Image (spheres, grey):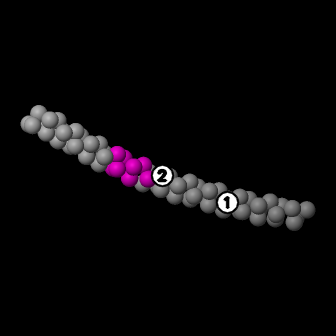
Amino acid sequence: MAKQSSRTVVNSANHSAAQEKIEQFRQELDQKLDQAIDHHEFKMVYIGIATLALFVGVIYAAWKF
């Protein structure tokens, strides 16, 4: 019976280590996801500003000529 209790301690330790690894993985995933979202937002803002500038340029050209 002593072996069973020592196994539960080992399993508990393994479970704790597995939980830590899962938590670390989730944190890394959250960081990478946040970085990807920030990068995407930056690209969308850049595309929006470029489109707006182009649109203003076309309107100006149509008005001027």
Q: Which residue is mark 2?
A: 33
The residue nearer to you, when weighing 28 against 33, is 33
SS for callout 1:
helix
The residue nearer to you, when weighing 4 against 24, is 24
Asked whether residue 49 appears in the rendered view, the answer is no
The residue nearer to you, when weighing 64 against 43, is 64
**Crowding near pointer 2: few (<14 within 10 Å), some, many (20+)?**
few
**In this picture, residue 5 sits left or right of residue 13:** right
Q: Amino acid at mark 2?
A: Leu
Above or below: residue 64 compared with residue 35 = above
Looking at the rendered image, the quarter that the C terminus falls into is top left
64 magenta-colored: no
Helix, strand or loop for the magenta stretch, by majority: helix
**In this picture, residue 61 sits left or right of residue 12:** left
Labels 1 and 2: the sequence-earlier one: 1
Q: Give the residue at the far right of this rendering.
A: 1
